[in-house]
């Protein structure tokens, strides 16, 4: 990714899944046991287009996006499944929701997915398609099924949806379905009961709290939004209030001021609440901050090198922080370290999908830019 790194994209995905309100949810209309919607695609990027569906064969539609870290992490194993079970299973990776900025053209999406797929090589050894321009796969499959998170796998056999869930569970599900021991009716009832269950008190409280704060931010009542966040999180366990605190930090950073944002985030981060990488990434990408703020973020990112994020990703963002400080020599040093780490990962086949040949090329281009800025 260019300006916004994968770690921010991961955080956005988490925030989206946690803060979507009941009023915003589309009623679930597609369940296990239903007839599968028609397969549409904008472009068949890799593999052979399916002309007909074989009786008794399993078709797995893997919904993903290039910005989705868990999606990328699951692909090497999905490739093993595709190769070892080719006689019984066909995997189709369906890229959806690729444009989180709302500014990409369909050609942009096609180019991005094609580049990513090529870079993955054998680690993406299955069919790959893009959604249609009108997002038929996202709407008719994911949204209709009440699925809001990526990755999501949907298994189809003889035109009927057998299962849907996280790909980490695919191996066991494939075995049970192929052995004929799978009870689709029971799974359907379980899914319908889950969709119709009454929200818990905690879920209702979080929904209401989020709406109050969001309404205040939309009205540009930042003091009110801040006060609401503080009063609500004070009554919640630390792990429950983390999303609201993240939202408050970004609100302060984007709309109020650096001092207010940094005063808050330092106090918040001192409690070790998580989201550290996202905080560091957000600060280094924000132009016109003080040297002190950038150094604070750089320290966070350094502490996270290979723990658990790829060190090359952290070092690349550290370099961006130094550039925003005007310290181009330090930026060049950090970028050289990022390149060395990336090459090391490629050789050792670590962080597959997060680090590709194209990553090294992009990092080297940035290094050349930084060196030109050194006087």
Image: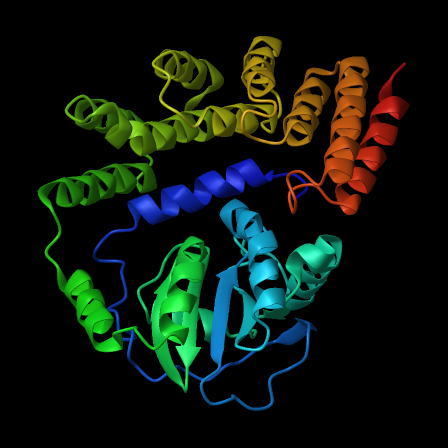
Residue 55 in the image, given as x and y percentages of width and height: 47, 90
Please say if 195 is above or below 18. below
- Between residue 178 and residue 371, name the one nearer to us: 178
Identity of the residue furthest to the front in this view: 179
Point out residue 260 in the picture as x, y percentages from the top left corner: 40, 16
Q: Is residue 141 above or below residue 249?
A: below
**Residue occupying image coordinates x 69% and y 29%:** 312
Vertical arrangement, residue 331 with respect to residue 68, above or below: above
Considering depth in this image, is 70 or 19 the residue closer to the camera?
Answer: 70
Does residue 221 appear in the picture of this structure? no
Residue 25 located left or right of residue 129: left
Quadrant of the image occupied by residue 87: bottom right
Identify the residue at the far top of this view. Answer: 292
Front one among 290 and 46: 46
Indicate the quadrant where residue 180 lies.
bottom left
| Residue 233, quarter of picture | top left
Can residue 125 be seen in this snapshot? yes
Q: Residue at x 69, y 66 (%)?
A: 107
The residue located at (61%, 60%) in the rendering is 79
Residue 242: image location, x then y, percent: 32, 29
Numbered circles on residues, count: 0
Residue at (65%, 27%) from the top-left corner? 311
Quadrant in the picture for the N terminus: top right
Direction from residue 189 to residue 256 in the image, left or right? right
């Amino acid at each position: 990714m260019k300006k916004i790194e994968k770690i921010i994209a991961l955080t956005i995905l988490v925030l989206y899944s946690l803060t979507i309100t009941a009023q915003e949810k589309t009623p679930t209309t597609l369940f296990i046991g239903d007839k599968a919607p028609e397969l549409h695609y904008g472009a068949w990027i890799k593999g052979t287009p399916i002309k007909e569906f074989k009786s008794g064969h399993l078709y797995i539609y893997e919904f993903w996006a290039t910005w989705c870290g868990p999606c990328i992490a699951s692909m090497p194993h999905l490739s093993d499944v595709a190769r070892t079970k080719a006689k019984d299973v066909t995997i189709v990776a369906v890229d959806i929701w690729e444009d989180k900025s709302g500014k990409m053209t369909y050609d942009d999406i096609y180019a991005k997915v094609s580049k990513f797929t090529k870079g993955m090589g054998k680690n993406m050894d299955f069919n790959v398609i893009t959604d249609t321009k009108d997002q038929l796969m996202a709407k008719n499959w994911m949204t209709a099924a009440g699925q809001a998170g990526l990755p999501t796998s949907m298994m189809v056999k003889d035109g009927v949806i057998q299962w849907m869930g996280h790909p980490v569970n695919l191996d066991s599900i494939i075995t049970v379905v192929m052995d004929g021991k799978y009870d689709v009716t029971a799974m359907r009832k379980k899914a319908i009961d889950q969709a119709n269950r009454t929200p818990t008190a905690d879920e209702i409280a979080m929904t209401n709290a989020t709406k109050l704060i969001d309404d205040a931010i939309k009205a540009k009542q930042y003091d009110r939004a801040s006060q609401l966040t503080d009063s609500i999180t004070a009554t919640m366990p630390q792990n429950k209030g983390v999303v609201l605190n993240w939202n408050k930090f970004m609100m302060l950073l984007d709309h109020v001021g650096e001092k207010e944002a940094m005063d808050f985030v330092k106090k918040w981060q001192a409690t070790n609440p998580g989201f550290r990488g996202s905080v560091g990434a957000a600060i280094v990408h924000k132009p016109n901050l003080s040297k002190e703020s950038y150094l604070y973020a750089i320290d966070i990112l350094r502490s996270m090198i290979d723990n658990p994020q790829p060190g090359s990703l952290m070092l690349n963002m550290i370099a961006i922080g130094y550039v925003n400080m005007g310290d181009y020599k330090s930026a060049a040093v950090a970028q050289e370290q990022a390149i060395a780490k990336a090459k090391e990962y490629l050789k050792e086949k670590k962080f597959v999908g997060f680090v590709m040949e194209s990553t090294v090329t992009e990092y080297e281009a940035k290094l050349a830019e930084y060196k030109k800025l050194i006087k």
